[in-house]
Image: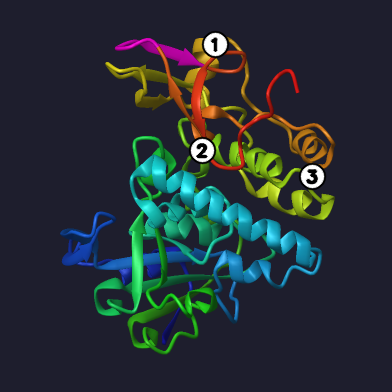
């Protein structure tokens, strides 16, 4: 890995400036098994608010959290798998849907990266004032193929991903995917640059921070992680350990339910689900969908169980060729639940 040192943000930007916005084409196999041509950015970037010896994936870092027990780790793997299924179905990306869960704070075997160096600079700049050195990686994705896979995290219901020009990257070798360390990966080492920035004072760091990049109020997917976590508790059938929820909940967007408009087909089953973002739902419904960390933690460690939201965990049917608004308190007709998520009969 080549390393470079810079003494200002402006000097770093000049060093990273490519000629235009280079891209390249690759044929990949989609979820249906067909070969399709995809345009990729030649370079991906990652900013870190310090200088660290390793750059592990979030799931790999979780293995080193001493507060997490063996039971907690089992729950975390269950959450990752459930998120993969739910986001994969919602995006049509199948297993690659886990990239969206990664974007919303669920630990996975992916790394958060971007094709916009200014976005990477935001994450490098977002550090306490006493931190005087930051890191930005430039990854030549074209030359890293076929050793890595990269998935774009922009979607009509993931506007934050679009604003961040967000991608998620993982090793292509499924047997080694959990060991991915960007700084110590022999297959791609020659194609990764490590730029270390030394800064004095706060002026530059503030200038390159863009807080609106983190805004998730406009994302239809933002309420999914908490809804999936609640569904996992229902499936698990027991209160979660406090150690698990105290660690995972602060990582996730804190929005309630899955506000949406559901359109039924000619024969009754759901034909289309149009998600409403938290900000739109609050405007339409005149209520806040925001949640508080402590409240969710207490809910998840309690003996109270919420029925899993049918928008994510069931198939609905309703009046043919009609659109209905679904939200808390709505009555819906479920004709099939995902295995393990069906509530008991009301008279049980």
Query: Residue 118 appears at what percent x and percent y?
Result: 39, 56
Q: Which mark is residue 39?
A: none
Q: Measure how far apart labels 3 and 2 are at the Cα level.
A: 33 Å
Earlier along the polypeptide chain: callout 3 or callout 2?
Answer: 2
Q: Measure how far apart labels 2 and 1 are at the Cα level.
A: 21 Å
Is residue 70 rendered to the left or right of residue 29?
right
Q: Measure how far apart labels 3 and 1 are at the Cα level.
A: 33 Å
Badge 2 element: loop
* Residue 39 belongs to the span the image colors magenta: no
Query: Residue 83 appears at what percent x and percent y?
Result: 53, 49
Give the residue at mark 2.
Answer: 215
Q: Residue at x 63, y 39 (%)?
A: 231
Query: Residue 86 appears at what percent x and percent y?
Result: 48, 44
Indicate the quadrant containing the N terminus: top left, top right, bottom left or bottom right.
bottom left
Q: Nearer the viewer, residue 127 or 6?
A: 127
Give the residue at mark 3.
Answer: 238
Give the residue at mark 1.
Answer: 285
Q: Nearer the viewer, mark 3 or mark 1?
A: 3
Q: Which quadrant of the structure image shows residue 61?
A: bottom right
Indicate the quadrant containing the C terminus: top left, top right, bottom left or bottom right.
top right
Q: Is residue 313 above or below residue 133?
A: above
Q: How many marks?
A: 3
Q: Which residues make up the magenta segment?
A: 319-326
Q: Nearer the viewer, mark 3 or mark 2?
A: 3
């Amino acid at each position: 890995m080549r390393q470079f040192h810079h003494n200002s943000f402006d000097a770093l930007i000049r060093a990273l400036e490519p000629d235009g916005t280079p891209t390249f084409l690759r044929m990949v196999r989609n979820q249906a098994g067909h070969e399709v041509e995809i345009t990729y950015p030649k370079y991906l970037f990652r900013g870190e608010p310090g200088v660290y010896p390793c750059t592990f994936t979030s799931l790999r870092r979780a293995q080193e959290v001493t507060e997490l027990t063996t039971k907690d780790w089992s729950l975390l793997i269950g959450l990752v798998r459930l998120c993969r299924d739910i986001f994969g179905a919602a995006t049509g990306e199948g297993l690659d849907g886990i990239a969206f869960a990664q974007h919303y704070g669920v630990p996975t075997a992916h790394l958060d990266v971007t094709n916009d160096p200014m976005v990477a600079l935001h994450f490098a700049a977002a550090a306490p004032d006493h931190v005087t050195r930051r890191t930005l990686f430039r990854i030549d994705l074209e030359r890293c193929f076929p050793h890595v896979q990269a998935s774009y995290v922009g979607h009509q219901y993931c506007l934050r991903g679009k604003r961040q020009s967000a991608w998620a990257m993982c090793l292509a070798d499924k047997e080694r995917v959990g060991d991915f360390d960007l700084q110590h990966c022999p297959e791609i080492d020659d194609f990764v640059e490590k730029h270390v920035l030394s800064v004095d004072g706060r002026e530059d760091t503030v200038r390159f921070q863009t807080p609106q990049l983190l805004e998730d109020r406009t994302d239809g997917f933002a309420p999914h992680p908490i809804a999936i976590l609640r569904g996992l508790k229902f499936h698990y059938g027991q209160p979660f350990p406090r150690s698990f929820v105290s660690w995972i909940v602060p990582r996730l967007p804190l929005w309630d339910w899955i506000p949406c408009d559901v359109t039924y087909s000619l024969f009754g089953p759901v034909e289309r689900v149009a998600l409403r973002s938290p900000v739109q739902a609050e405007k339409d419904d005149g209520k806040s969908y925001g949640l508080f960390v402590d409240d969710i933690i207490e809910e998840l460690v309690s003996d109270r169980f919420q029925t899993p939201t049918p928008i994510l965990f069931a198939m609905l049917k309703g009046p043919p060729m009609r659109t209905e608004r679904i939200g808390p308190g709505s009555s819906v007709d479920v004709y099939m639940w995902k295995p393990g998520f069906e509530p008991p009969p009301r008279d049980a």
